Amino acid sequence: MKSAPALLGLLSDRRTVSGTELAGRLGISRAAVWKQIKVLRAAGVAIDTCASRGYRLARALDSLDASAIRNALSTAARKRLGALETHWKLDSTSSELSRRAVDLRDFSFIFAEMQTAGRGRRGRDWLSPPAGNLYFSCLKRFEHGYAALSGLSLAVGVAVLRALQDSDVHGVKLKWPNDLVAENAKLAGILIELGGEFLGPCQAVIGVGLNVRLSSSSRMAIGQPVTDLDALCAGMPPKRNALAAALIERLCKTLEIFAERGFETFTDEYAQYDALSGRALHVHDPRGAFDGTGAGVDARGALRVRTADGVRTLDSAEISIRPA
């Protein structure tokens, strides 16, 4: 889709543009324009065909812009920030950060309009339709080893939730171990990949996927209850560059605190927004499935489930939790 970003740019003001004009300005054939339109539609971009007059975006394009994001940051956040990049398409933002981690500073952020191989928890694919949601990853180094990072995904969830509240988005909860949900539907997911020395020092590549505007085709492809900021904000979600800046602000502050004090600092706030606490749960554990009631998380970020035999503490990445 080499010419796809340029094509979207030509349609960005939502005026109707003929196939002939698009072809001329892009230096390609009308057939190639039609092919690009089909590819973008299949990827989830809503493009209308206006009778015989041409094409128009169904909604205004809200493109990511590194300069706009940087300018929206506080002075303190700009000082902390390492690299800040926005890309049209990557295999995944986390893969890109991992490949370049040795050369990048702490608090480097990479955003992509589209991912071709986005990853979710337990090896699942993360569907990443272009130019509508937020897909990004952050690099953070830690002096200690992997054990000191217990609960990191939960602390990141708190940071994302705070950024949403800063952006006037409410009604969001945290679902152990790495999701944000609203009305039992998934809004965002977090994936953390560790590297470096097991006993320290180490690094975390923190990937976040946040649904801003999901097309109907994307919703059908995901195969589980999902929601987006468009639905939560009555059709007026935050602008993506402003939201990206809010996320960077909160993540930088949260990760600095976590590096010094661990997850225990965030336990009370996590408890306020815990989507599983007090709920009947069905737990798929590699050692055997069982039912129980959510009983919060402990100071390490492990899930506590109350069963007939007592409280069980769970911290395996292979566990799946569903409402009973």
Image: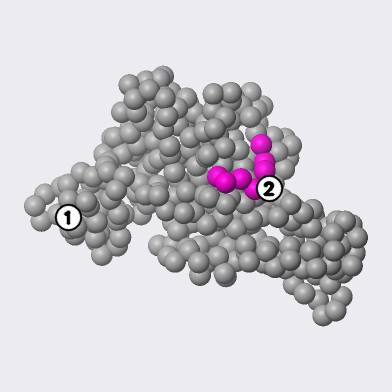
Q: Residue 247, position in %: x, y?
A: 57, 41
The quarter of the image holding the N terminus is bottom right
> Does residue 109 sit above or below 104 in this rendering?
below
Left or right: 220 with respect to 233? Answer: left
Give the residues drawn in magenta, as a range.
Answer: 85-92
Which SS class for mark 2? strand
Q: Main secondary structure of the magenta part?
A: strand
Tell me the quarter of the picture where residue 93 sits: top right
**Which residue does the image show at 44% across and 66% down from the upper left?**
223
Q: Nearer the viewer, residue 147 or 313?
A: 147
Q: Nearer the viewer, residue 57 or 39?
A: 39
Q: Is residue 246 visible?
A: no
Q: Which residue is mark 1?
A: 288
Q: Residues within 10 Å of mark 1 (few under 14, many from 20)?
A: few
Q: Residue 323, position in %: x, y?
A: 29, 62
Count of labels in the image: 2
Q: Which residue is mark 2?
A: 88
Left or right: 260 with respect to 216? Answer: left
Q: Residue 268, position in %: x, y?
A: 34, 39
CA gap between label 1 and label 2 equals 43 Å
Amino acid, disc 2: Trp
Which badge, 1 or 2, comes first in the chain's sequence?
2
